[in-house]
Image (cartoon, helix red, strand yellow):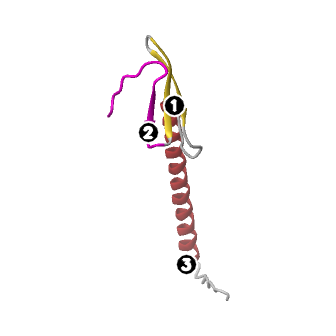
Amino acid sequence: MLVLSRKNGQKIIINDNIEITILDSRFDICKIAINAPKDVKIYREEIYNQIQLSNKMSNKASADAIESLVSLVSKDLETNKKKNKVFIIKKEK
């Protein structure tokens, strides 16, 4: 981790295309301005953490849904096997 000290009005340049300017710093609050290309995503930490949590929950729900679907299809195939039903899947050209 790089730790820098900056005064009001001073800047930090990252990767030639991201510019961070210290606007104001008093006591334990620091105001900064970030100038970056539109394709660079910038989030406050608490927002970023919430997005990550939402993504994890979404992936879990998707995995649970797929697992439930596989279970239902497996049960249906077993039921139809017991009834001596035959399924023919025909691929058309």
Camera-side residue of 65 and 26: 26
In the rendering, at what x and y percent does residue 59 appear? 51, 51
Location of residue 7 by image quarter: top left
Q: Position of residue 44 (x, y in %)?
A: 51, 31
Mark 2 lies on a secondary structure that is: strand
Which residue, given by chain and number where applicable, does mark 2 sit on? 14
Give amino acid for label 3. Lys
Which quadrant would the N terminus be assigned to in this image?
top left
Q: Main secondary structure of the magenta part?
A: loop
Q: CA distance from mark 2 to mark 3?
A: 64 Å
Q: Which residue is mark 3?
A: 81
Counting labels gives 3
**Farthest residue toward the right?**
92
Query: Mark 1 or mark 2: which is in front?
Result: 2
> Mark 2: which amino acid?
Ile
Q: Position of residue 16 (x, y in %)?
A: 46, 43
Find disc 1 in the rendering and name its residue.
44
| Image point (46%, 24%), residue name | 10
Q: Residues within 10 Å of mark 3 (few under 14, many from 20)?
A: few
Q: Residue at x 58, y 82 (%)?
A: 84
Residue furthest to the top in view is 27
As for residue 3 lying within the magenta part, the answer is yes
Which stretch did the figure color magenta? 1-16
| Residue contact at pointers 2 and 3, CB within 8 angstroms | no
User: Is 34 situated above or below 61?
Assistant: above
Q: Of helix, strand and loop, which one carries label 3?
A: helix
Of circles 1 and 3, the one toward us is: 1
